[in-house]
Amino acid sequence: MAHWIGILDDQTVTTKTILVEGSVAGNVVSFVQSGEREVGYWVGKEYWGRGVATEALSGFLGHVETRPLYAHVARNNVASIRVLQKCGFRISDEEPEGLILKLEANERDEAQ
């Protein structure tokens, strides 16, 4: 809880709760790390494979206008990579822990 209190107190962080049929399914967050605006999300396992993450991230991108926007994802998290790509992100770099995807200006519009 202390972690979330710090996040919610940070005025540079944007957070949204993901709701499915009135139930909390997860969250989407945008924050600045190392001078770059990043996005992350978490969806409960019972909601996987239903398009929830893609729909939530797509809607969230309308609230975060900063571009470029980055996401870090584990190389073996194929589903999350696909969510990001459906929302217009492209693989821009690799790191030991995984991949870095980047959303440029206008790429979200082209993905929809």
Image: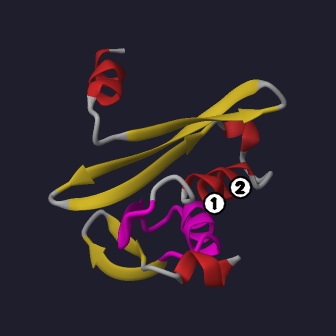
Q: How many marks?
A: 2
Q: Secondary structure at mark 1?
A: helix
Q: Which residue is mark 2?
A: 55
Are the residues flagged by discs 2 and 1 in contact, CB closer than 8 Å?
Answer: yes
Residue at 54% across / 59% down in the picture?
61
Q: Amino acid at mark 2?
A: Glu
Q: Which residues are magenta?
A: 65-89
Residue 3's spot in the image, x, y percent?
Answer: 30, 23
Q: Secondary structure at mark 2?
A: helix
Q: Amino acid at mark 1?
A: Ser
Residue at 34% across / 57% down in the picture?
38
Q: Quadrant of residue 26?
A: top right
Residue 52's spot in the image, x, y percent?
Answer: 73, 49
Name the one closer to the observer, 68 or 21: 68
Query: Of all residues shown, which one is farthest toward the top?
Result: 1
Tell me: 10 left or right of 69: left
